[in-house]
Image: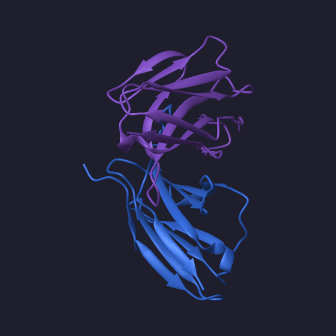
Amino acid sequence: DAGVTQSPTHLIKTRGQQVTLRCSPKSGHDTVSWYQQALGQGPQFIFQYYEEEERQRGNFPDRFSGHQFPNYSSELNVNALWLGDSALYLCASSLAGDKQETQYFGPGTRLLVL
Amino acid sequence: LAKTTQPISMDSYEGQEVNITCSHNNIATNDYITWYQQFPSQGPRFIIQGYKTKVTNEVASLFIPADRKSSTLSLPRVSLSDTAVYYCLVGGVYDTGRRALTFGSGTRLQVQP
């Protein structure tokens, strides 16, 4: 049973560039959430996708956008990168209709913006 | 979403039982309580989840009193590999959509030999 996978594991970009991160949910899951975790802090919710639509969004600017594909995998896009976007980006998957809505996390993508 | 409060850090020794308490005074009726463990540069790992009373699995126990305004994660006989940050989260499925998790700063557990 494959868990949540993310790619790439590490990425280095420069200010102003754009980046795309990818996530494949745990087998059987249909909902994907994205989180940003700065060094020494807890993960912060970016947005959540279900049925290929953004269902909830945290306090992040429009530079952060996403997409969910018919196979439930998802992408996170960040435009016009700032130095402050350097963080560990986490993807979590869950199953809609599960009353407890337990989310399982992937290993993350470490993004460094220079 | 309900706010949670946990100790910033805790120290323990190998073989001891560790109890981490989380307060969540404004927990809602629909909310579940979930604990995650996170090692540096890794994604949070689900430990345990509960709604009320006591839940036990192969790695931990979760104690929730009747008023549900707090919860305690119990780790029996910790080892060095249990050194990590532990997050307590409260949330549920809301009418507005699916659930988002709100992480606090967590509790940094340091296990000494």
Count the marks: how many? 0
Q: Residue at x 41, y 56 (%)?
A: A106
Quadrant housing the C terminus of chain B: top left
In this view, which residue lies farthest toward the left? A1
Q: Within the image, what quadrant is residue A83 found in?
A: bottom right
Q: Is residue B100 left or right of residue B2?
A: left
Q: Is residue A33 left or right of residue B113?
A: right
- What's the colour of chain B in the image? purple
In this view of the protein, can residue B89 be seen by the observer?
yes
State whether residue B1 is above or below residue A104.
Answer: above
Query: Color of chain A here?
Result: blue
B6 or A54: which is nearer to us?
B6
Residue at the outermost front position: B113
x and y percentages locating residue A110 in the rendered image = 49, 70
- What residue sits 65% from the left and 45% below the top? B104
Which residue is located at x 47 percent, y 57 percent?
B40
